[in-house]
Amino acid sequence: MRCFSVRKHEENTVGKRIAAFVRQETVLSAAAVLAVISCFFVKPDREYLGYVDFRTLILLFCLMAVMEGMKELGVFRFLSACLLERVGSARGVAVCLVSLCFLGSMIITNDVSLVTFVPFALLALEMAHMEKYLCVTVTLMTIAANLGSMLTPIGNPQNLYLYARSGMSAAGFLALMAPWSALAALMLAAGTMFSFRGEAVRCQMEKPKKPERGRLTLYLALFAVCLLTVSGVLPEWALLVVILTAVFADQRELLARVDYGLLLTFVAFFVFIGNMGRLPQFCSFLESFLTGHERIAAVAASQVISNVPAALLLSGFTSQWKDLIIGTNLGGLGTLIASMASLISYKQIAVRHPEKKGRYLAVFTAWNVGFLAVLLAAAAFLG
């Protein structure tokens, strides 16, 4: 009887751990299930190795490792604190915070931008007695991070992947997304000016310590190496060796902070897409469905499964890369899960201000749907 009780307790513990993992890594879990199911239709063989885009995985890993080093040094918090010292109005604080996310996400990705600046913003708003603006500020920061990141190939995971798959040049990518980014910047400026008044505030907060010059130089150099690899100047395997060696020698713990869940999500989708691509009937159906509707299909899929999985899924059945790039970036607006980066902001609100969760979700949805509607309407002019 006692053995049965112990066994039942162990089963309950395992069940709780699995449930907790699924809640924490919902997209990875769903991708893994799809990959496993697809294996029943296409038996594992040597062709599976060809499914995985190792270049994208290596670039993602290396960029995330370098960004962890930058975060550890407090580079972004130090810069943002210096900027906030120079503003004296509620509108100025908002413009500063939204601009940090918009411009920062182009270089450090939308995820890192929100992980870094949203907690800082919550503290800054409290210090400036601007709590009434909390929901709209974080909402605009989140939109800014998602839209700012669409300009560059390294701004978000789907851009990095689609850029590698498309064979576009960096200049071509920037030219494609520049009009959309310019419009997004104008919309964010208008939204910020409309939502915030010019009343005087003083944001008094302790400035983070200045980053160590030697380590800062190291990580800036590593970031430059990443950019050279993205541009095709250096091979990805050389980048991997450089990053692993440098980060391990500097602070090996940073390697444990890389988002391996995201990397495994990519692998699972690669397997699923590869297997589905070997089923002629499925390919014909999806290709006929997508033809001529790639952009709106990417936007719609993003609302349900988020834009990174949408990019991975749809890329296996169309070569209209420009429409996929635009569609998955615009698709990051809308629902809370349209961009997984948006969940970062929501979780910060839920932890720090649980009483504001409902209001934040309402404000977030209203602004996101509004931005998405305007940008989709603008497609008639931007092409």
Image (cartoon, helix red, strand yellow):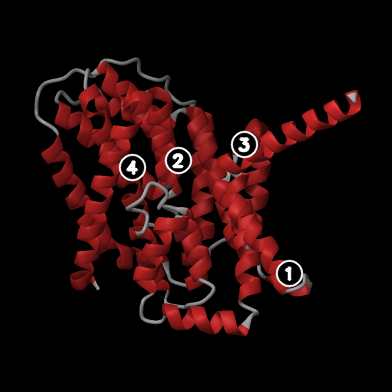
The amino acid on which the numbered mark 3 sits, given as a three-letter code, is Ala
Residue 142's disc number: 4
Q: What whole-number distance in Å separates the C-alpha atoms at marks 1 and 2?
A: 37 Å
Nearer to the camera, 44 or 252: 44
- Do callouts 1 and 3 mark residues in contact (Cβ within 8 Å)? no
Task: Give the Cα separation between the discs numbered 4 and 3.
Answer: 26 Å
At label 4, counting other C-alpha atoms closer than 10 Å, the crowd grade (few under 14, some 14-19, many 20 or more) is: many
Q: Residues within 10 Å of mark 3 (few under 14, many from 20)?
A: few
- Which residue is disc 1 drawn over? 40
Please report whichever mark, 2 or 3, sits nearer to the chain's N-terminal start: 3
* Badge 1 or badge 2: first in the primary sequence: 1
Q: Which residue is mark 3?
A: 20
254 relative to 8 in the view: left or right: left
> Distance between the Cα atoms at labels 1 and 3?
27 Å
At x 47%, y 59%, the residue is 158
Residue at 43 percent across and 38 percent down: it is 344
Q: Nearer the viewer, mark 1 or mark 4?
A: 1
* Residue 108 coordinates in the image, percent (x, y): 43, 44
Labels 1 & 2 near each other (Cβ < 8 A): no
Q: Circle 4 — which element?
A: helix
Mark 2 surroundings within 10 Å by alpha-carbon count, few (fewer than 14), some (14 through 19), many (20 or more): many
Residue flagged by tag 4: what amino acid is it? Answer: Thr
Measured as percent of width and height from the top left, residue 112 is found at 45, 40
